[in-house]
């Protein structure tokens, strides 16, 4: 339970700090619907479509902050072609768009003492794109 409390504390710090970037349409923050709770399993941002996620991740790494993409959509996963088990006949533009813009920020036990490093790196890197 204390681990979850620590993660929620870090999650809330991220969420509060990124509101200004959301208001500027630079990122979208996670949305927790009213009446719902979460366990702070991860914190992600949805980058503005003008921001190259791979370059963003590379620049964050240059500041010693490891961010990752979240997933490759199943319909475009290379393994799907090899398996030839499922064929997606429809385009999935929303899924493709989201997957290209979603980036996960570090969220691990003990991040609270290093969260300023992440936030400072984010500010420096995002300024390269805006």
Image (cartoon, rainbow, N blue to C red):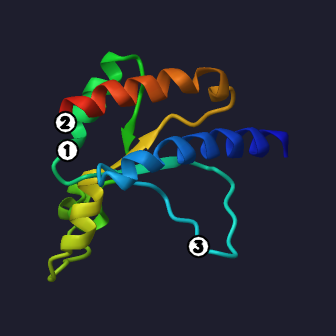
Residue 72: image quadrant is bottom left
Marks 2 and 1 in Cβ contact (< 8 Å): yes
Q: Which residue is mark 1?
A: 51
Q: CA distance from mark 3 to mark 2?
A: 30 Å
Query: Could you tell me residue 63's position as x and y percent?
Result: 36, 17
Residue displayed at 25% across by 58% down: 77
Query: Could you tell me residue 83's position as x and y percent?
Result: 24, 64
- Rendered-image quadrant of the C terminus: top left
Position above or below: 123 against 63:
below
Position above or below: 99 against 66:
below
Q: Which residue is mark 3?
A: 33
Residue displayed at 84% across by 40% down: 2
Label 3 or label 2, whichever comes before in sequence order = 3
- Is residue 122 toward the left or the right of residue 111 in the image? left
Query: Could you tell me residue 104's position as x and y percent?
Result: 43, 43
Q: Which residue is mark 2?
A: 129
Q: Residues within 10 Å of mark 2 (few under 14, many from 20)?
A: few
Position above or below: 48 against 96:
above
Q: CA distance from mark 2 to mark 1?
A: 6 Å
Label 1 or label 3, whichever comes before in sequence order = 3
Viewer-proximal residue among 124 and 85: 124
Q: Residues within 10 Å of mark 1 (few under 14, many from 20)?
A: some
Position above or below: 83 against 44:
below
Kindly give the residue lying farthest to the bottom in the view shown. Answer: 89
Viewer-proximal residue among 12 and 102: 12
For numbered disc 1, what is the local secondary structure? loop
For numbered disc 2, what is the local secondary structure? helix
């Amino acid at each position: 339970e204390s681990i979850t409390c620590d993660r929620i504390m870090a999650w809330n710090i991220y969420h509060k700090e990124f509101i200004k970037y959301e208001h500027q349409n630079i990122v979208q923050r996670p949305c927790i619907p009213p009446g719902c709770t979460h366990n702070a399993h991860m914190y992600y941002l949805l980058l503005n479509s003008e921001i190259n996620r791979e370059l963003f991740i590379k620049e964050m790494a240059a500041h010693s902050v490891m961010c990752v993409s979240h997933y490759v959509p199943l319909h475009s996963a290379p393994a799907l072609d090899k398996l030839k088990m499922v064929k997606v006949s429809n385009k999935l533009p929303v899924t493709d768009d989201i997957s290209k813009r979603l980036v996960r920020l570090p969220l691990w036990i003990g991040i609270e003492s290093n969260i300023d490093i992440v936030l400072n790196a984010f500010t420096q890197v995002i300024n390269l794109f805006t």
